[in-house]
Image (cartoon, helix red, strand yellow):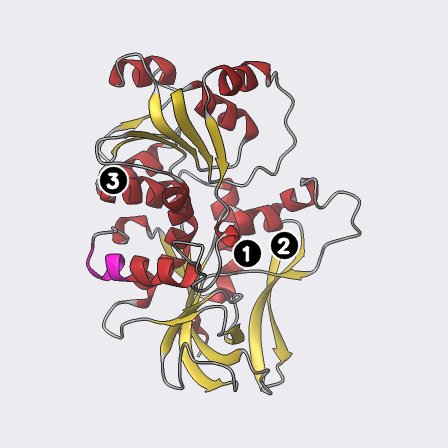
Amino acid sequence: MKTHELVFIQPHQVELQEREIDTGLAPHQALVESECSIVSAGTEGAGFTGLIQEMPSSRGKQNMYPQTTGYGHLGRVLEVGSDVTMCQVGDRVLSFSNHASLVKADAVRCALPVPEDVAGEKVVFARMAGVSISALRSSTVQPGDTALVIGQGLVGNFAAQLFQLAGAEVMASEINPLRIEKAKACGIERGVNPNETDLKEYVMDWTGGQGVQIAIEAIGVSELVSEAVMLTRPYGKTILLGTPRAPAVFDATPMLLKVHMEAIRMIGSLEWRWPPHEVNRYRHNIVENYRQIINWIVQDRIIVEPLLTHKASPVDCQQIFTGLTSDKDVYLSAVFDWGLLN
């Protein structure tokens, strides 16, 4: 059986390739025919541009290309392995699979059934909101708390929406006008462009000179992590939601001094630090996070529709990845429709 999959050949070059797929399944796998898949502009963009090679964990490694890509996938289950209980044949499932027309999903880790009556290009956004909910789970947010979210890509947008759902007073910081517009369309009313307004003055005026109780850096820029700390009040929390990748040279002492003197907690919130399934000593787990997010999307408590700027055939992958990484005034998100290959 053949599958078509997206492959980064080298930095800035992606291709749709055909290959044979062995349909024999390991006990934990499900064979899934693809409906659509969503692009993570941050994580996948780092692979597309070559930024991933600059990460400390990648330095010194041999050439990392070619590499497959993708981790947000929606499709129909054709077969299941012997240990799979999360889904069954015929289910429509969300999984952490690559961009491909036919995939072997890790269905013990996550192949979560989703409703039939919700559009695929809507429910597949749950994958990106699943990244964002880790910031909420890492916090001790209470109704009425002030929260600053730096960055309004998909991860930052969903973080802002989720903190609002939890009752926080949320402010978004974003330099891109398209993303500010989309944030407002999703109900995030308080937005600031720091290229136009002094962010520190705005935050201090908003919080009575104290700073926010929770600051979330949702881009992965080291200098912005420092800025987030400087805008956090004493005994507050700064949450690293974005993954820092690019090297940075700046004076970190003011940030570290503030953390030390004002008892600020810096919290890493990578989603993979939660267990995939229920574990007694953990209050939350990844699968239940996604189950909750899907429900909120179906109920329109998490707003998705304004965020989709591009729906495309996988054949157009080069245009999509180039746009997402270099034309951010036009591209915010992209969903590949695998039905367009037929």
Foreground of the two, 146 or 185: 146
Foreground of the two, 217 or 253: 253
Residue occupying the far front of the picture: 280
- Residue that mark 3 sits on: 164
Q: Residue at x 63, y 54 (%)?
A: 13
The disc, 2 or 3, on the residue closer to the chain's N-terminal end is 2
Disc 1 versus disc 3: distance between alpha carbons? 36 Å
**196 to 328, vertically: above or below:** above
- Residue that mark 2 sits on: 13
Query: Which marked residue is nearer to the observer: mark 1 or mark 3?
Result: 3
The location of residue 41, given as percent across then percent down, is 49, 48
- Residue 318's label in the rendered image is 1
Kindly identify the amino acid type of the residue bearing the numbered disc 2. Gln
**311 to 55, vertically: above or below:** below
Kindly identify the amino acid type of the residue bearing the numbered disc 3. Gln
Disc 2 versus disc 3: distance between alpha carbons? 38 Å
Foreground of the two, 81 or 23: 81
Query: Can see residue 29?
Result: yes
Q: Residues within 10 Å of mark 1 (few under 14, many from 20)?
A: some
Q: Residue at x 40, y 47 (%)?
A: 132
The disc, 1 or 3, on the residue closer to the chain's N-terminal end is 3
The location of residue 98, given as percent across then percent down, is 53, 66
> Quick check: is 177 in the magenta stretch?
no
The disc, 1 or 2, on the residue closer to the chain's N-terminal end is 2
Give the extent of the magenta segment. Answer: 295-300
The location of residue 1, given as percent across then percent down, is 58, 87
- Marks 1 and 2: CB-CB under 8 Å? yes
- Residue 83's label in the rendered image is none
Foreground of the two, 201 or 16: 201
Kindly identify the amino acid type of the residue bearing the numbered disc 1. Gln
At mark 2, the secondary structure is strand
Q: Check the picture and name the quadrant holding the C terminus.
A: bottom left
